[in-house]
């Protein structure tokens, strides 16, 4: 499968679809997931067009990991999360539904169930206060 420039993350990167930004640098963008598995679920994507980690350049992969670590630390601190789950799905058989490489950064607490992936959409206005807590911890 070749990279599809019409995927939702490519449109977010081009500014065609809005997002609730948490972090951005020259190589990456992090924003709130509108279909969160837990409150505070953030997606970190590279600006380089790549369907999955196997297609991403080594330089962008390194930058993506650095950005993901920065965001994960901010999610943990900003939301007082006891744990943080990092997930990456590569290919449809692995559960990937948006074919632009991305990390899920999901705050975790004991006894709190994880929601199902890509099932329910939340109003983006409800995500802004959560994003503000995360941004304040950057």
Image (cartoon, helix red, strand yellow):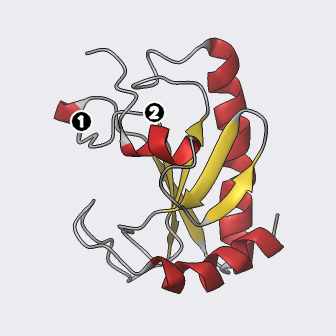
What residue is drawn where x is 62% and y is 24%? 61
Q: Position of residue 106 (x, y in %)?
A: 50, 63
Taking 79 as reference, is 14 above or below it?
Answer: above
Mark 1 to mark 2 CA distance (whole Å): 13 Å
Q: Position of residue 42 (x, y in %)?
A: 54, 61
Q: Earlier in the sequence, mark 1 or mark 2?
A: 1
Quarter of the figure with residue 7: top left
118 vs 61, left or right, is left
Could you say which disc has been placed on residue 120 in the image?
none
Q: Position of residue 14 (x, y in %)?
A: 56, 41
Could you tell me which secondary element the residue under label 2 belongs to? Answer: loop
136 vs 14, left or right, is right
What residue is drawn where x is 22% and y is 67%? 119
What residue is drawn where x is 34% and y is 33%? 99
Q: Residues within 10 Å of mark 1 (few under 14, many from 20)?
A: few
Quarter of the figure with residue 55: top left
Q: Residues within 10 Å of mark 2 (few under 14, many from 20)?
A: many
Could you tell me which secondary element the residue under label 1 belongs to? Answer: helix
| Residue bearing mark 1 | 94
- Quarter placement of the N terminus: top left
Q: Nearer the viewer, residue 5 or 44?
A: 5
| Residue bearing mark 2 | 101
Q: Nearer the viewer, residue 124 or 133?
A: 124
107 vs 115, left or right, is right
Taking 101 as reference, is 129 above or below it?
Answer: below
126 vs 137, left or right, is left
What residue is drawn where x is 71% and y is 78%? 132
**Camera-side mark, 1 or 2:** 2
């Amino acid at each position: 499968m070749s990279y599809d420039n019409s995927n939702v993350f490519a449109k977010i990167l081009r500014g065609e679809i809005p997002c609730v930004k948490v972090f951005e640098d020259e190589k990456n963008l992090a924003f709130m997931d509108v279909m969160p598995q837990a409150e505070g679920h953030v997606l970190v994507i590279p600006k380089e067009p790549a369907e999955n980690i196997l297609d991403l350049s080594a330089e962008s992969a390194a930058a993506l990991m650095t950005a993901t670590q920065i965001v994960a630390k901010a999610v943990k601190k900003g939301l007082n999360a006891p744990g943080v789950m990092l997930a990456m799905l590569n290919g449809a058989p692995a559960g990937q539904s948006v074919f632009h490489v991305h990390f899920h950064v999901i705050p975790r607490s004991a006894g709190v169930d994880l929601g199902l992936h890509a099932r329910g959409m939340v109003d983006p206005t409800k995500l802004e206060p959560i994003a503000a807590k995360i941004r304040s911890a950057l």
